[in-house]
Image: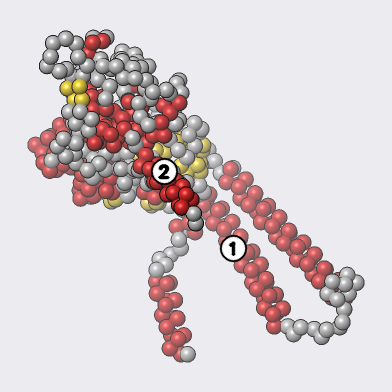
């Protein structure tokens, strides 16, 4: 066979293998190592307004790119009644999650911290009530609501009643830091 | 040669030793299953007869000597052999059609009989399929007598029962071989299955439609009681969960209510009211754990709570980080929920 053919075949194989990662189903996450989960802080210790800061983490990246984790997050979002306040992401008594405004930071590490710690004006703390893996899955799903996850990994359909298009059909919105937005 | 036949006799004896009675599907415990079993034997008898005839015919034609070449071409339409072959083939096609029509009619008659089985006094039980467990609700008697349990159906013997079958996620199929045929649970639709059970006993059932990763571990148990025993079971299940006795069980209740258990499970009589996982009010009275994947023992319950993903990978019950004291106290609490 000619050598360009080899190259093309190799490229196709590589692409195919790269596609497998989004479908990998990790039912049980290994216990987190220190530093894996990144650090999410809400403000820098400097004058003036500053957006919440987070260090990207391997854990966050893993959950953010995996279709299984995101679809499980979608399940928990309904089961744990996040709908009750945030509706299907459009917001109700809680802020909207499908827009570009993030009061407490829009990175996956920030969203996980928000679910874990709770936030003023109504968001309860779920630390100890929702296991760590489910918190990351929820955070990954919440990010995918505004299109902030690889398109092939975002859920392509809605299992329950949902007025909007599936997450895969949405255009990614830029995330804007939230501290300056003030509480709603 | 003799040793050979002895050996084969020994092997046959070994195989037969594995059979204790008939397989579940051929040992009916109610009128519906009896009709289906009757149909099964009728089909088996006819198919066996047809198969034997075909093999006999094939053997005879193999043994028969080829006729002397009479010089006629086999493709010559006028030859006597050709004409007799056409007659034989026509007759056999006709016989095949006749047999198939007869089988179709008998299947239709059985199906119509099954549809007419519905008895007079009907108790309705709502079954909802979930990935991967069965929700069971008794709601005939109004709100005060509504009862939710999971993976275990109790019915009185000799009473017509109607199951209304729903699904919460994907298509499942309800099948207890000794009771009757299968019926699918389809999302957004209510299907019905009517049956009566003649003999008291415990009948094992299983999801019969592939429904995802843990389809094979979606078992259920049907317990048929005499009437008065059933009433006792029902009134004991209606009671809210009993308060924990002893310091360990009290700590267990606290752990149950403050950790992830409370997000999904209901224990009536406590603040736990989650509706997305099995009702645990009387979990210790049931015979199995995790949709009858494991028997109800303290060890099995511990294994399931400590690491559900090792018992049923992909199940929607997550692993909760519990220390050993918490796990033991939760077990002590659950064991008292009789």
Vertical side of B306 occupied by A149: above or below: above
The tag on residue A15 is: 2
Of all chains, the one bearing label 1 is: B
Residue B240: quarter of image: top left
Q: Residue furthest bottom?
A: B1
Residue at the spot 45% in from the left edge and 38% down from the top edge:
B170
Where is mark 1, residue-wise?
A: B44
Residue at the spot 16% in from the left edge and 17% down from the top edge:
A43
Say what secondary structure mark 2 lies in: helix
Label 2 environment density (alpha carbons within 10 Å; few <14, some 14–19, many ≥20): few
Vertical side of A34 occupied by A123: above or below: above
Residue B97: quarter of image: bottom right
Marks 1 and 2, how far apart at CA:
52 Å
Residue at the spot 40% in from the left edge and 46% down from the top edge:
A14
Res. B230 in view: no
Of all chains, the one bearing label 2 is: A
Residue at the spot 41% in from the left edge and 26% down from the top edge:
A167
The tag on residue A26 is: none
Residue B310, given in percent of the width and then of the height, sits at 27, 48
**Is residue B107 toward the left or the right of residue B28 in the image?**
right
**Is residue B171 toward the left or the right of residue A22 in the image?**
right
Residue B151, given in percent of the width and then of the height, sits at 36, 43
């Amino acid at each position: 066979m000619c050598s360009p053919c080899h190259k093309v075949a190799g490229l196709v194989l590589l692409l195919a293998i790269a596609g497998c990662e989004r479908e990998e189903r990790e039912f049980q996450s290994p216990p987190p190592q220190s530093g894996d989960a990144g650090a999410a802080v809400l403000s820098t210790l400097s004058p003036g307004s500053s957006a919440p800061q987070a260090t990207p983490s391997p854990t966050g990246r893993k959950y953010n790119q995996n279709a299984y984790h995101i679809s499980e997050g979608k399940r928990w979002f309904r089961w744990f009644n996040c709908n009750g306040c945030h509706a299907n992401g459009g917001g109700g008594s809680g802020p909207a999650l499908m827009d570009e405004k993030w009061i407490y930071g829009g990175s996956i590490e920030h969203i996980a911290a928000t679910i874990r710690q709770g936030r003023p004006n109504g968001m309860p703390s779920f630390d100890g009530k929702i296991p760590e893996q489910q918190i990351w899955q929820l955070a990954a799903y919440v990010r995918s609501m505004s299109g902030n996850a690889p398109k092939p990994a975002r859920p392509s359909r809605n299992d329950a009643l949902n007025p909007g298009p599936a997450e895969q059909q949405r255009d990614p919105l830029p995330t804007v830091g939230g501290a300056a937005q003030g509480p709603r | 040669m003799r040793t050979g036949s002895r050996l084969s006799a020994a092997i046959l004896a070994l195989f037969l030793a594995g059979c204790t009675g008939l397989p579940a599907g051929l040992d009916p415990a109610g009128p519906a299953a009896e009709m289906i079993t009757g149909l099964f034997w009728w089909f088996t008898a006819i198919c066996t007869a047809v198969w034997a005839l075909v093999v006999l015919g094939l053997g005879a034609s193999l043994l028969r000597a080829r006729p002397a070449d009479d010089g006629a071409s086999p493709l010559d339409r006028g030859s006597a052999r050709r004409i007799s072959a056409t007659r034989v083939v026509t007759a056999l096609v006709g016989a095949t059609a006749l047999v198939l029509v007869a089988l179709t009619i008998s299947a239709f008659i059985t199906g119509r009989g099954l549809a007419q089985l519905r008895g007079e006094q009907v108790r309705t039980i709502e079954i909802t399929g979930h990935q991967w467990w069965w929700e069971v609700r008794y709601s005939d008697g109004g709100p005060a007598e509504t009862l939710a349990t999971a993976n275990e159906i109790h019915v009185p013997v000799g009473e017509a029962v109607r199951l209304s079958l729903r699904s919460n996620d994907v298509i499942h199929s309800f099948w207890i071989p000794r009771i009757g045929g299968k019926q699918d649970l389809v999302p957004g639709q209510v299907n019905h299955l009517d049956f009566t059970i003649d003999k008291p006993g415990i009948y094992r059932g299983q999801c019969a439609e592939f429904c995802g990763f843990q389809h094979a571990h979606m078992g259920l148990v049907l317990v048929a009681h005499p009437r008065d025993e059933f009433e006792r079971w029902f009134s004991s299940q209606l009671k809210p969960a009993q308060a924990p006795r002893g310091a360990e069980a009290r700590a267990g209740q606290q752990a149950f209510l403050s950790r992830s258990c409370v997000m999904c499970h209901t224990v009536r009589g406590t603040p736990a009211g989650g509706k997305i996982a099995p009702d645990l009010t009387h979990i210790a009275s049931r015979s199995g754990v995790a949709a009858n994947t494991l028997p109800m023992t303290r060890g099995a319950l511990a294994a399931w709570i400590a690491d559900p993903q090792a018992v049923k990978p992909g199940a929607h019950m997550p692993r909760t980080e519990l220390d050993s004291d918490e796990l033991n106290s939760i077990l002590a609490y659950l064991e008292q929920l009789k």
